[in-house]
């Protein structure tokens, strides 16, 4: 409960000292907790029901919905405050950030940010271009109590240029059409903000779609790639597959901590000059039976073991999307207006980050409730259960008092434990 107090009070201090600001700061922290506790999905009506039932807040529906759709919530100040609450954010002297995008399917035709985006994971009986939101997000990769986790740091809604030119209702905010930004521009803006805040080298772990000169040029040179006279390079080595075939005989064995276990891998490393990125990169070919994986980094100071180990938790951002969309429940949101959609997703992402920070500040790792073969580390749901117990403790409301208190129903607490 004291951990929650230490996390929530700095967020409350971000709000203004006016009467409205003081009221909103209380609503904000309890809404954040209502999204984080594993009671039900975080659609706005369920959040309101949680605030009334679990925390005893007396809120009028109309005023709460107006709060959730407010255009004045200080997210640009709240996120840096939450970043500052992360204990020891760096790994090997670097802030490791995962970058990826994901789609959130919707049904309403007037929901902000929606379009027909391509779904790379669509099955045979599903549409390849579902009506959905495209969310570009970054998350801090950090080891918490012996396991890797992805803490969401920021996000952007990507809107296609053709939809913006059509000036439909799904691309309007405050009555005006949103300006177009490429995914590379959005990613560079978020990563620069992370660097300016932490003032440490930022290591971006991403897939091949973002791992090219489109992003590197915006970060290293501050501008998109420009055409001009090409530089002179050495002899061409060949394609990645050709190099893998040629270098396999020269590969060495490495001991790497990967996916929670010490593993023995066969790999080969070489520094090459990439014509596309116009800079030297270290490429590591990791071989397994008849297959291989090629990893590339512009950080030449990293060892082969570090490159493989640091790329391993990249998948955690995919797990983070699952936690946000399914566990937290952002996929079931029915909000439509631009500010309501943005606020709801901000609450979901911030609740996820708050949960992981809470786990990092615990004295010992949470106990896993549901045992799965091959997985000994705790799960995200285990931390949410502990956070819910702390938030529903009778002494917590004395530390973070709500505007009005009503006795909590013991049956509701028992139901919450069953849901957790």
Image: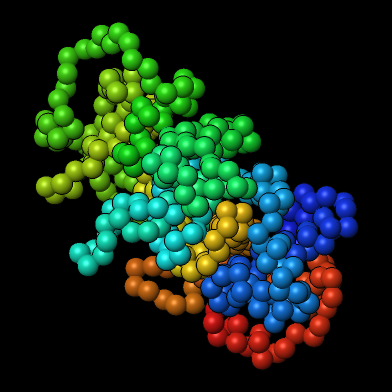
| In the image: residue 229, left or right of residue 314 | left
Residue 359 screen position, x and y as percent: 59, 61
Using the image as rendered, state which of residue 360 and residue 182 is in the foreground: 182
| In the image: residue 321, left or right of residue 383 | left
State whether residue 194 is above or below residue 387.
Answer: above
| In the image: residue 189, left or right of residue 10 | left
Residue 377 screen position, x and y as percent: 45, 65
Would you say residue 84 is visible in this rendering? no
Quadrant position of the C terminus in the picture: bottom right
Q: Quadrant of residue 43?
A: bottom right
Furthest residue toward bottom: 411
Residue 194 screen position, x and y as percent: 58, 37
Using the image as rendered, state which of residue 292 and residue 351 is in the foreground: 351
* Residue occupying the point 78% across, 77% down: 58
Would you say residue 82 is visible in this rendering? yes
Residue 346 screen position, x and y as percent: 59, 55
């Amino acid at each position: 409960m004291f951990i929650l107090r230490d996390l929530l009070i700095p967020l409350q201090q971000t709000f203004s000292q006016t009467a409205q600001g003081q009221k909103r700061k209380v609503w904000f922290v309890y809404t954040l907790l209502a999204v984080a506790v594993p009671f039900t999905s975080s659609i706005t009506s369920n959040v309101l029901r949680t605030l009334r039932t679990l925390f005893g807040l007396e809120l009028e529906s109309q005023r709460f919905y107006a709060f959730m759709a407010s255009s004045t919530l200080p997210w640009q100040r709240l996120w840096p405050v939450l970043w500052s609450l992360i204990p020891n954010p760096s790994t090997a002297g670097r802030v490791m950030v995962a970058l990826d995008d994901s789609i959130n399917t919707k049904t309403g035709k007037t929901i902000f940010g929606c379009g027909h985006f391509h779904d790379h994971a669509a099955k045979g009986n599903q549409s390849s271009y579902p009506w959905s939101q495209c969310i570009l997000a970054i998350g801090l990769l950090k080891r918490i109590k012996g396991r890797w986790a992805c803490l969401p740091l920021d996000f952007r809604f990507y809107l296609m240029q053709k939809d913006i030119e059509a000036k439909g209702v799904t691309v309007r905010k405050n009555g005006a059409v949103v300006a177009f930004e490429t995914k590379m521009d959005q990613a560079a803006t978020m990563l620069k903000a992370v660097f300016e805040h932490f003032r440490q080298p930022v290591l971006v772990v991403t897939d091949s779609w973002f791992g090219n000169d489109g992003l590197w040029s915006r970060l290293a040179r501050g501008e998109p790639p420009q055409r001009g006279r090409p530089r002179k390079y050495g002899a061409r080595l060949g394609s990645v597959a050709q190099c893998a075939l040629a270098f396999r005989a020269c590969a060495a064995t490495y001991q790497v901590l990967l996916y929670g276990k010490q593993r023995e891998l066969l790999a080969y490393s070489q520094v090459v000059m990439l014509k596309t990125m116009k800079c030297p990169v270290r490429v590591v070919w990791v071989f397994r039976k008849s297959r291989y994986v090629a990893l590339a980094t512009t950080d030449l100071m990293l060892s082969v073991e570090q490159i493989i180990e640091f790329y391993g938790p990249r998948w955690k951002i995919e797990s983070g999307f699952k936690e946000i969309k399914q566990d937290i429940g952002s996929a079931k949101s029915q909000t439509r207006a631009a500010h309501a959609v943005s606020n709801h997703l901000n609450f979901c992402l911030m609740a996820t980050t708050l949960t992981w920070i809470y786990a990092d500040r615990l004295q010992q790792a949470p106990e896993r409730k549901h045992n799965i073969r091959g997985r000994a580390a705790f799960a995200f749901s285990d931390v949410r259960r502990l956070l819910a117990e702390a938030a529903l403790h009778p002494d917590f409301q004395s530390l973070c008092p709500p505007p009005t208190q009503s006795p909590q129903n013991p049956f509701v607490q028992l139901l919450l434990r069953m849901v957790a």
